[in-house]
Amino acid sequence: MDVMTNTASVNAIGHFLSDYAALLLRSGATCIRLEKNVERMAERWGMDVSMTIMPRHIHFAVTDSDGHSETFIATIGKNLISYNVITRLSKLSWKVADCGLSPVEARGIFEKIKQTPCADKWWVLVAASLANGAFCRLFGGDAMAVGVVFVATLAGYYLKQTLLGAKWDVRVTFVACAFVSSVLAAAGYLFSLGGTPDVAMATSVLYLVPGIPFLNAFSDMVDGHYICFFSRMTDAAILTCCLSAGLCLGMKLMNVGMF
């Protein structure tokens, strides 16, 4: 009977930790954060956990103090970057460690975190446009260039939201959005808007730069997760090439040269 109880406990904790890890990594967390959070909870529940983190899957081996072990494979799924979810999941791991939450209580909180709504898309659209306009000013663009970049980003980011919502391939989406933004940014050249149209053109696609994958890839490299490092770095490099292709196509169509 004790063996069955221990096995059930290992099974329940293993399923929870695998679900937790998949959501954490899918939300944009680094591998080192994943390891620390999962190990923190497993230790509090008296379990030993071994993980192999792959680009699309996480392999778990959960063992209790009596040596009963279960193996789990969690599928990460499509990335949905959310720092809000990452923060709440990290807080959950500390609640388990500091307050002694049971696996059942932790599962209840986890299910609520899974229902965390995404940020309002209209607010994100305006915020991203303002941020990209600020980048233009930071790189020396004048007021007119900032306005051009704001409009170009507004149109491009809206297109990105629309195409990704329609399940378009992310690489095709990046090419299309960079193309639209660069064409609109060429207005600075065509209509002699301001004195820094080159800055407007160069910064019009910065909102597409995959900063989070680049940063996470570097973190994974430092921590020795080389498979995830190569995967994330490759994805980021491909997306960067896609936005560059869209930018070049837009400049070619509008007969705008940077050099």
Image: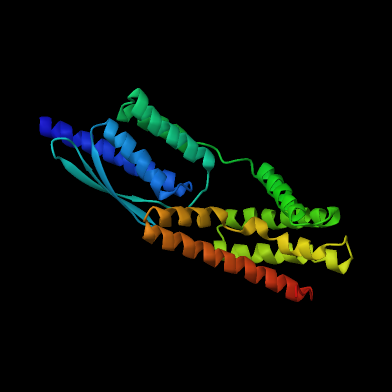
Q: Position of residue 21 (x, y in %)?
A: 37, 44
Q: For the N terminus, which image quadrant?
A: top left
Taking the view exactly as shown, the residue that stands out farthest to the top is: 99
Quarter of the picture containing the C terminus is bottom right
In this rendering, the answer to whether 148 lies above or below 35 is below
**Could you say which quadrant of the image residue 99 lies in?**
top left
Q: Is residue 182 above or below residue 80?
A: below
Would you say 222 lies left or right of 133 here? left
Total numbered labels = 0
Q: Residue at x 27, y 36 (%)?
A: 13
Q: Where residue 183 sits in the image (x, y, percent)? A: 76, 66
- Could one spot residue 78 in this view of the protein? no
Depicted 118 relative to depicted 159: above or below: above
- Name the spot of residue 31 as percent of width and height, x first: 40, 49
The image position of residue 17, as x and y in percent, is: 32, 40
| Viewer-proximal residue among 256 and 154 | 256
Render colour scheme: rainbow
Residue ID at (84%, 68%): 189
Give left or right: position of 173 versus 223.
Answer: right
Q: Residue at x 53, y 38 (%)?
A: 84
User: Which corner quadrant of the image does residue 15 belong to?
Assistant: top left
Specify whether residue 93 is in view: yes
Residue at the (42%, 59%) spot, across then down: 229
